[in-house]
Every structure is written in C-alpha cells, then in structure tokens.
Amino acid sequence: MGELTDCLANDYPVWISDVKDISSAIQMIKHVGTMVGKREKAHLLVEEIKKAFNSFTIPPITTLPKATYLIWQQPYMSVGGDTFIHAMLTAAGFENVFAAESRYPVITINTLIALDCQVLLLSSEPFPFNQKHIDELQIQLPTTKILLVDGELFSWYGSRMLQAPDYFKMLHNKLK
C-alpha cells in the first residue's frame, strides 16, 4: 500500500481493489458485498452478470476486428492489455491493437494507420468524444469504422456489467 493508504489504515478500515478483468470484477463484487453485509445480493448480481456474459455470442466472423478504444484526446490515449477496458473489448469481440502495451498508452494517428486499425471506439468518458471528433478523425482514417461508445459499459465494473453484453451486440450490428 502507499504512504497515504498506510496512514489511513491506522484509523480506518481500508480496502483496495485492482480490477483488470471480468473475473477480478466478479471477485470485487463478492468481496464488497461481504464487507457491507450484502453477501446474498452480491451473489445474485454475480450470477446475473455471468448469465449475461455466457449468453453473449460474438457474431460469426473469421477474425476479430482490430480495434482501438480512445479514452483521451490531446494527446490521444488508448488502453493497454492490463486494463479492465481491454478485458471488456475482448469480451465484446474486438482485438485490441494495443494489447501488448500497459495501462493507457499515448498514441498517434500514424500508429493507428500502421497497425491497420479497423474499428475506432471513442469513449464517452473520461474525455467526452462526440460527432465532431468522428468527423475530424474520419478524414485521417477514411477506411476505419468510427463509433461513439458508452464508456460506462466498458469501464465501470459492477452492476453496469449486466447491460454490457446487450450493448456489445448492438455495437456489432452497427459494424455490419
């Protein structure tokens, strides 16, 4: 733990999570449910999340679309393979072109072109991308499909995970 966390732990209960994938998100939900006296509710939520993800199937395709998920502009930042967003991208049926990177790499448009990014997902948070950004990027990436996406459904672990599989289906329908 860090210095501040250690200091707080002297006087208060402290719990730290490091959610990087769906499995660790499920473990976090169970742990928090137990800590706050809602173990049964947490268990039911976990079962619903598992059921939602188990019922989600990626449309039949020969290869996963090579995708980039942008979280920031100026500089452009994406997500590496050690993040929860990467795990959700994979679950959604995309190949993260920055999977070999860690955390939140700074990237360039030239890198997207060099890596043959087929799908560019612009998150609603933490940077609020909008149609103006699609229009600007589409000029530089004319063969890339660019979509605005709900950042909560890719990055908020917990009950939002229930909605993610249906949202992923809708995204794939937009790619057709």
Image: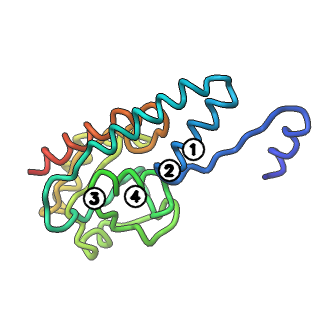
Residue tagged 1 = 27
State how far apart marks 4 and 2 are (Cα).
29 Å
- Confirm or deny contact between disc 3 and disc 1 (CB under 8 A): no
State how far apart marks 3 and 2 are (Cα).
18 Å
- Confirm or deny contact between disc 2 and disc 1 (CB under 8 A): yes
Identify the element where label 1 is drawn: helix
- Give coordinates of residue 98: x percent, y percent: 39, 67
Image-based side of 38 in relation to 173, left or right: right
Identify the element where label 2 is drawn: helix
- Give coordinates of residue 30: x percent, y percent: 58, 36
- Front label number (4 vs 1): 1
- Give coordinates of residue 166: x percent, y percent: 25, 37
Q: Which mark is residue 76?
A: 4
Residue tagged 3 = 94
> Upstream in the sequence, badge 3 or badge 2?
2
Identify the element where label 4 is drawn: loop
Image-based side of 45 in relation to 90, left or right: right
Residue at 35%, 44% (x, y): give it.
Answer: 123
> Upstream in the sequence, badge 4 or badge 2?
2
Quadrant assignment, res 62? bottom left
State how far apart marks 3 and 4 are (Cα).
19 Å
